[in-house]
Amino acid sequence: MIQETLAEAGQKMERTIEATQEEFGNIRTGRANPALFASIEVDYYGAPTPLQQLASFQVPEARTLLITPYDRSALGEIENALRNSDVGANPANDGNIIRVVLPQLTEERRKEYVKIVKTKAEDGKVAIRNIRRKAKDALEKMAKDGETGEDEVDRGIKELDELTKSKVESIDKLLDAKEAELLEV
């Protein structure tokens, strides 16, 4: 029972790390990346549709992204969605594809992105700590209800603390890597 609780907490923590890493991917560095457009939705025949379902992406150069819609009639809507997004890009439509050239990041903008990344990392750490707290409460409830011995629960809590520490360190490593990537000129 204790191992099941620890395994479940470990899985939830791992999913939190993956979600944090995905959030980091949405934050722009100096290079073009299709993940930047993951959160953009296009009004496609009256329904908000994720851009990644409507087009393919190519990265021919470091700061250039080519977006090729599967349906040419959606070209205008895709261009409008890109223009209205917070990506900070200026799309150019040539009738078949949309070329997005990302502007060079300024030092000030890089520092803003670092602050955003740190906030997202802290959110991930808080989520991991919340998972730890719930698992610890479940373990303590087992001891209180007499389902298992207190020594076993104490060992389980120590294991849980080690697991939590390693997962928080994983987020710190991701943060350090993203921060270095953002500040790279």
Image (spheres, rainbow, N blue to C red):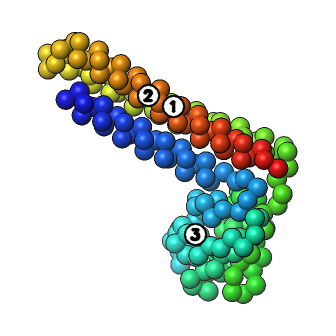
Which residue is denoted by mark 1 in the rendering? Answer: 168
Which residue is denoted by mark 3 in the rendering? Answer: 51
4 lies above or below 183:
above
Instruction: Please state, as top left, top right, bottom left or bottom right, where the N terminus lies in the image.
Output: top left
Give the amino acid at mark 3: Leu
Spatial separation of the CA atoms under disc 2 and disc 3: 36 Å
Q: Circles 1 and 3: CB distance less than 8 Å? A: no
Asked if residue 96 shows in the view, the reply is: yes
Spatial separation of the CA atoms under disc 1 and disc 2: 6 Å
Mark 3 nearby-residue class (10 Å; few <14, some 14–19, many ≥20): many
5 lies above or below 182:
above
For the point 85% across and 45% down, which residue is it? 107
Q: Circles 1 and 2: CB distance less than 8 Å? A: yes
x and y, in percent, of residue 142 in the image: 20, 20
Give the amino acid at mark 2: Thr
x and y, in percent, of residue 5 in the image: 27, 31
x and y, in percent, of residue 121 in the image: 59, 37
Place residue 69 in its image quadrant: bottom right
Spatial separation of the CA atoms under disc 1 and disc 3: 32 Å
For the point 50% across and 47% down, which residue is it? 19
**Which numbered circle lies on residue 164?**
2
SS class, disc 3: helix
Give the amino acid at mark 1: Val
Mark 1 nearby-residue class (10 Å; few <14, some 14–19, many ≥20): many
In the visual, does 107 lie left or right of 69? right
